[in-house]
Amino acid sequence: MTLLMLSCIILTGRISDWDHYTHFGGVSDILIEDSSVIGATSGGVIFGSIEFGSIVWDSTWTCPGNLAHSDARCLARDSFGNLWIGTNGGGIDVGLVSGGVQHYGQLEGLPISLAINCILPDTTIWVGTTEGLCSRELGYFEVWTEFTTGGGLPSDIINCVASVDSGLFVGTSDGLVMLRSGQHPGQPGSWLKYPAVANIIVQDILVAGDTVWAASTDALYYLADGQDWKLDSSYPGSYPISLASFNGLLAVGGKGDVAIFDGSQWTSGSGGVGTQMVQAISWISVDSLAIGQYSNYTVNRASGNGVGIGTLNSWTSSWPQGAPSNDLYAVDVDSRNDVWVTSNRRGAAVYSEYGWVGFINELSSANQVFACLADHSGGVFVAPWHYGVTWLDWKGTPDRSDDVFLNLNSGNSGLLNDQITDMAISPTGEVWFAQEAYWQTPSEPSGVCRLSWTPGQTETASWKTFEPSDGLPSGDVRSVEATLSPLVAWMGTREGLVKGNIQTGQVLLALGTGDGLPSEDIQALAVSRDGRLFIGTTGGLVFLNIANETITDVEQVKGNVSMLCFDNLSCLWAASGEGLFRIYPDGTIEEYNIVNSPLQSLDIRNAACDSDNGFLYIVTDHGLWKLTLEQGMSGSIETAAVYPNPFIPGDGQVLGVAGLPDEVFDIRLFDLTGKLVYESLSQHRNAFSWDGYDIDGNPAASGTYIVRITQSGADRFIKLAIVR
């Protein structure tokens, strides 16, 4: 294996804009002020007003923008009217009454993770984090942990705080304690422990008159004046999370239900809540509540039903329009340049001129939708894991009456099984499916399938398969990449890489660690315009020179390389746990991470390029990002460009054309004396490439050249530098 030494640039690069599309339905906290509603969601902060029993949403704060991080977890209003916002990874942002936002992070003393669970802005600002309890009296936060309190705190994970005359109640992941009023947190004797509520996960604390209530993950407790903590065995729920009181009424939000206590008896209901966690609850009036919800099945509160208005079994829920979820898996751009994304728990959605249009009930399943592929006809394949694949012929409007949906599975098609991990499409329209066996039935057929059909007409479908019996080293196929041949594809498995002919079952090439792969667990594949195959593995990134079958290591991209995608300028985008990398044709690498870009995590699952407009879309566990690149492929003759410029032939580069319609054009290359060096007539934008050899078959020398592009009777002249 040879080693490719590349220059690595760590900077914000040549991306002009980072647009973030998030989901606002996973709500962690709500603040009701008269008729206004403010919600802290995993996509940002939402602002609305209550009108006639429902919410009209006015605006949102997210990142990049007003917040340092989009995953907002708690809200509080101080005595001056400032809005305090705690985020899960970005510290604290304060919306000032005077205007603007003030940020508190590590420089102000907050713990390194900047994960904020609760805020109490009193004379002392108290902040509960995942790394201790913070207090701020002057301009700097002090952090109190199990260690610095001498065991006074039972856990460093602080979920909730509440103030009373006698001190500060602190709910943690391992019990509830009180910091006595006026006592220093650093002294063990300053803390009052309660054996009755020790070793429980305290989710919320509420002071209502002479009674203090504590919600844990399995029970509800209360502390009456002059007594010890007691278990409320009459509470009808099983998982209390949030508490609110009003005029002697106590409301408790739980796992799929809400309960109300009037001082003598409980009334509960679960209608309309379903699988939602009622993480926040607040009274609007004596007969109306607001609840903040997120789905019980999502990770990091990535999606949910937003804010509900109502009581017990009658709720009206809504959230501002946005992405279907923040926990996204796949993305692709269709022939209309509409953007399709798939999610972990909320199916698929498309973003178009109509905003977001979601697809949940139309799919065979809305869960774990790992793969998405737009075909040449305008249709889209969406693959929920363990449920085959759904082909959607969406007509481009919110009206569904003329849409077509076909659900294909191992029972009604030629699929080997129902677990599709990746898809690819060949230049002639054949669709390739990478599949793996279900974990409960590991002996079921698995491998690669290829579908040839007239899109939407199942009677024309022809299926071919490539399995371990044909030479695959493993039936667990993680990635597939089509070639120019409709019969041949690259197949990346858990135990090596294969190039196979699906018609004959012939293995044309097989590669493993003995051939130079850093790992045989292949995660992603991508073919460059000059024919190199880039291979993302759990051990790093390499590329295969197909002509001489040599493997070269891309040294700077290490770790589990789970995503590869070429943009319209032949730059390769690669994602690993260490960063998002853009590799230019000349070998330059730009690295994007959570420090030098707006990215909020490096859990990057998939990417797709809108070549016409020069956009790169990436999906993450924090929503969809749109990156605006330097140059789109479409345009007019006046915006035509050649790339890369300067051009280094013989170093894995081919020359391309961008910025003009994908219609027939002529291209000619002249030296400065006017001599014709190269010409290519009647080309199409997406098919043109030049390897640097002149019309006589000799390498064009280093120097400056003039490129003439002719399309529809108009000319454009461009200077090109060739470097050897």
Image: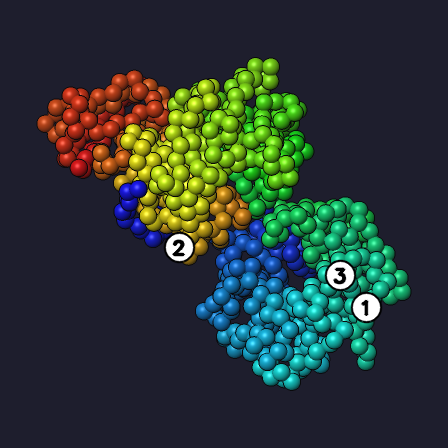
Residue corresponding to mark 2: 596
Who's the residue at 75% across and 51% down the image? 256
Q: Can residue 334 be seen in this view?
A: no
Q: 10 Å neighbourhood of mark 2: few (<14), some, or many (≥20)?
A: few
Tell me if residue 134 comes above or below residue 279 in the rendering: below
The amino acid type found where label 2 is placed reads: Asn
Foreground disc of the pair 2, 1: 1
What's the amino acid at mark 1? Answer: Leu
Q: Residue at x 53, y 34 (%)?
A: 475
Indicate the secondary structure of the residue bearing disc 3: loop
Q: What residue type is labelled 3?
A: Asp
- Sequence order check, earlier mark of 2 and 1: 1
Q: What separation in Å lies between label 2 and label 1 (alpha carbons)? A: 50 Å
Left or right side of 360 for 573: left
Residue at x 56%, y 55% (from the top left corner): 71
Q: How crowded is mark 1: few (under 14 residues within 10 Å), some or many (20 or more)?
A: some
The disc label shown at residue 231, or none: 1
Q: Provide the residue designation for mark 3.
A: 218
Nearer the observer, 212 or 35: 212
The percent position of residue 512, horizontal first and vertical second, equals: 40, 38
